[in-house]
């Protein structure tokens, strides 16, 4: 009999099972990368194939948590793409300054480095006092790290360079305390940040946002899911509120090009236009 590649079918069944059992919907994540990660887990679980993984995920919540972690790529850093932060500092904040209260949502914040970078920049521009930052992710392990605000000292020299490139005027070390091989960001920054579990696939919008940053998350979604998330951002933003996507991410449909105007194509900065 002809050899058939059963992997796509088995992966679909696994994702249906996960959705049925736990309510997490990965059916519209970009297939290639999700298959790669599932195969990796099979190979590291002493299982022969994805079908065997279905039973294990269904009946063993600890194993499901492992699966959930695999599904979430948590790579992040402070002042990632520093010139995007420079644009925010020199251009977007001029508009945001006109609001008496500024709401910013970091969707898919992972372990939080990006939101602390934003808080530092807002502090330097004299705006942090009137800002409320929301940092959300569906991965509770990452959120726990983000809430603590404790990071390895080893990364700080790289982050200091990115901070400078982003227009930072001080030293990053002015914002944290060092203990042994770790640093902890100051409470003054953390008190303006609310960390929360939020799943872009199934949870609701955040109201009255002036800026939404969702970088390097939509690349893991298929087109349908990307449009769902973009609609969520649109209904979360005030009129003329900003949306910033990652380097590899775009609006992707004519509808979204009506809903958002491009402010800077290179840096993926968009502005929400009047409700359409
Ligand atoms: C590569 S990190 C990006 C972190 C940060 N935004 C950056 O650009 O450095 C992607 C994050 O998206 C999160 N994520 C993936 N799917 C999600 C979903 N459906 N809802 C919320 N967060 C999600 C992952 O858990 C992960 O922390």
Image (cartoon, rainbow, N blue to C red):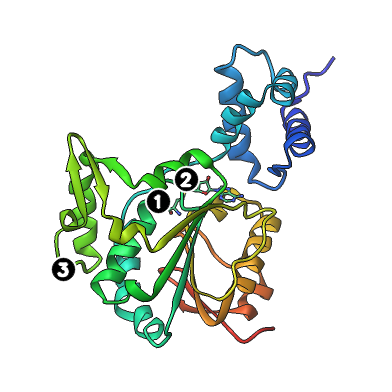
Of pointers 2 and 1, the one earlier in the residue sequence: 1
Is the Cβ of the residue at disc 2 closer than 8 Å to that at disc 1? yes
Vertical side of 136 occupied by 57: above or below:
above
Of pointers 2 and 3, the one earlier in the residue sequence: 2
Q: Residue at x 52, y 54 (%)?
A: 136
The residue where tag 2 is placed is 143
Residue 245 position in % (x across, y down)? 49, 63
Q: Nearer the viewer, residue 55 or 131?
A: 131
The answer to whether residue 75 is left or right of residue 36 is left
Q: Quadrant of residue 232?
A: bottom right
* Quadrant location, the N terminus: top right
User: How far is the residue under mark 2 from the one under mark 1?
Assistant: 7 Å
Residue 152 position in % (x across, y down)? 26, 39
Vertical side of 59 occupied by 145: above or below:
below
User: How far is the residue under mark 3 from the one under mark 1?
Assistant: 22 Å
The residue where tag 1 is placed is 112
Q: Nearer the viewer, residue 262 or 177?
A: 177
Mark yes or no: residue 91 visible: yes
User: How far is the residue under mark 2 from the one under mark 3?
Assistant: 29 Å
Residue 90 position in % (x across, y down)? 29, 78
Q: Secondary structure at mark 2?
A: helix
* Quadrant location, the C terminus: bottom right
Q: Residue at x 78, y 32 (%)?
A: 17
Q: Residues within 10 Å of mark 1 (few under 14, many from 20)?
A: many
Question: What label sits on residue 169 in the rendered view?
Answer: 3
């Amino acid at each position: 009999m002809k050899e058939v590649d059963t992997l796509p079918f088995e992966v679909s069944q696994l994702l249906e099972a996960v959705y049925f059992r736990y309510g997490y919907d990965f059916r519209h994540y970009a297939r290639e990368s999700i298959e790669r990660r599932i195969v990796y887990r099979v190979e590291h679980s002493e299982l022969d194939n994805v079908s065997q993984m279905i039973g294990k995920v269904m009946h063993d919540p600890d194993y499901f948590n492992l699966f959930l972690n695999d599904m979430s790529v948590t790579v992040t850093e402070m002042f990632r793409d520093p010139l995007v932060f420079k644009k925010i500092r020199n251009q977007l904040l001029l508009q945001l300054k006109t609001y008496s209260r500024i709401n910013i949502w970091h969707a898919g914040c992972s372990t939080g480095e990006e939101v602390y970078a934003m808080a530092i920049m807002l502090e330097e521009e004299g705006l942090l006092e009137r800002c409320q930052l929301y940092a959300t992710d569906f991965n509770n392990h990452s959120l726990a790290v983000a809430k603590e605000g404790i990071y390895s000292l080893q990364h700080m020299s790289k982050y200091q360079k990115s901070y400078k490139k982003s227009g930072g005027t001080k030293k990053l070390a002015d914002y944290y305390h060092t203990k042994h091989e770790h640093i902890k960001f100051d409470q003054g920054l953390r008190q303006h940040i609310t960390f929360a579990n939020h799943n872009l696939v199934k949870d609701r919008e955040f109201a009255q946002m002036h800026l939404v940053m969702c970088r390097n998350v939509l690349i893991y979604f298929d087109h349908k899911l990307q449009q769902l998330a973009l609609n969520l951002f649109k209904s979360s933003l005030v009129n003329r509120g900003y949306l910033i996507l990652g380097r590899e991410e775009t609006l992707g449909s004519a509808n979204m090009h009506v809903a958002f105007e491009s402010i800077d194509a290179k840096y993926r900065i968009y502005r929400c236009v009047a409700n359409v």
